[in-house]
Amino acid sequence: MEAYGDFARIYDILMDDTPYREWCGYVTRTLEEHDIRDGLVLDLGCGTGTMTELLAERGYDMIGIDFSDRMLEEAVRKRERSGRDILYLQQDMREFELYGTVRAVVCLCDSLNYLLDEEDLLRCFLLVNNYLDPGGLFIFDFNTVYKYETVIGDAVIAENRDECSFIWENYYDADRSVNEYDLTFFVRQEGELFRRFTETHLQRGYTLPQIRALLERAGLSFLQALDADTRRSVTRESQRIYVVAQERGKAL
């Protein structure tokens, strides 16, 4: 089944406690530390465009790329309400194309974990390096093997709300470091009538050494890694990690 199909319509409802403004603050502070206060920025795996809108609000000229047409439909609705000049493109992270370079690429909310093969992740990193301005920044996060193996793996999460409810079942394959999300949603249609639909998502956990090695192979310089929850040094129990890398020259 297609990931982020029907789920796209209620994604923002179920993600309403996601600290997007906090994430945006971290991203903009990091950009400003490297004297990137304006110009073109790519939001890779932009989803429904919440982070894209926040960065546009901070004065950046935003491009958003996502593979899901349904998620992009939600992003376009936000753009219509805000009136901001944001370009959205439906493209695969492994094959995306831009008309020119950008000052920074941002990829948050574990979008990169949807790339299940190291070679696919490398292809993405190579493209990022190719489309960054000289010295441009790549700021991203990823969920760790520890998170899938210890925190989420084989857990069942459920939530009941007035407008929708969900059951989220996890199955972790330790041999492949891949977590399967089986999602069942019940969405209110009218009155007491609810519609049931399901989606399956696959994400792979990565370790920081794996990520660093792939960045280096792609020609990017690794600058920093932080525990995304504490903003302190990464530990073996870090669940989500922020990484900052920098363009250092294009491959010949």
Image: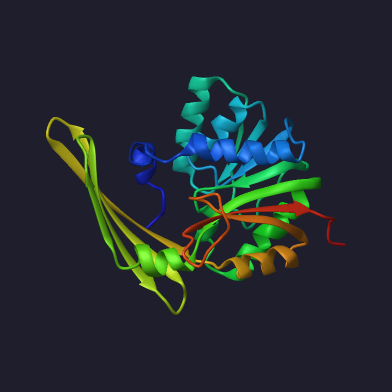
Q: Is residue 133 above or below residue 157?
A: above
Query: In the shown orientation, is residue 68 left or right of residue 221?
Result: left
Residue 224 or residue 100, whichever sits in front: 224
Residue, far left: 192
Q: Is residue 14 above or below residue 167?
A: above
In the rendered image, the quadrant that contains the N terminus is bottom left
Residue ID at (52%, 51%): 228
In the rendered image, the quadrant that contains the C terminus is bottom right
Q: Is residue 64 visible?
A: yes
The quarter of the displayed image where residue 225 is located: bottom right
Q: Is residue 89 visible?
A: no
Query: In the shown orientation, is residue 164 left or right of residue 62?
Result: left
Query: In the shown orientation, is residue 192 left or right of residue 14?
Result: left
In percent of width and height, residue 135 lies at: 81, 47
Residue ID at (62%, 27%): 58
Q: Is residue 137 above or below residue 189?
A: below
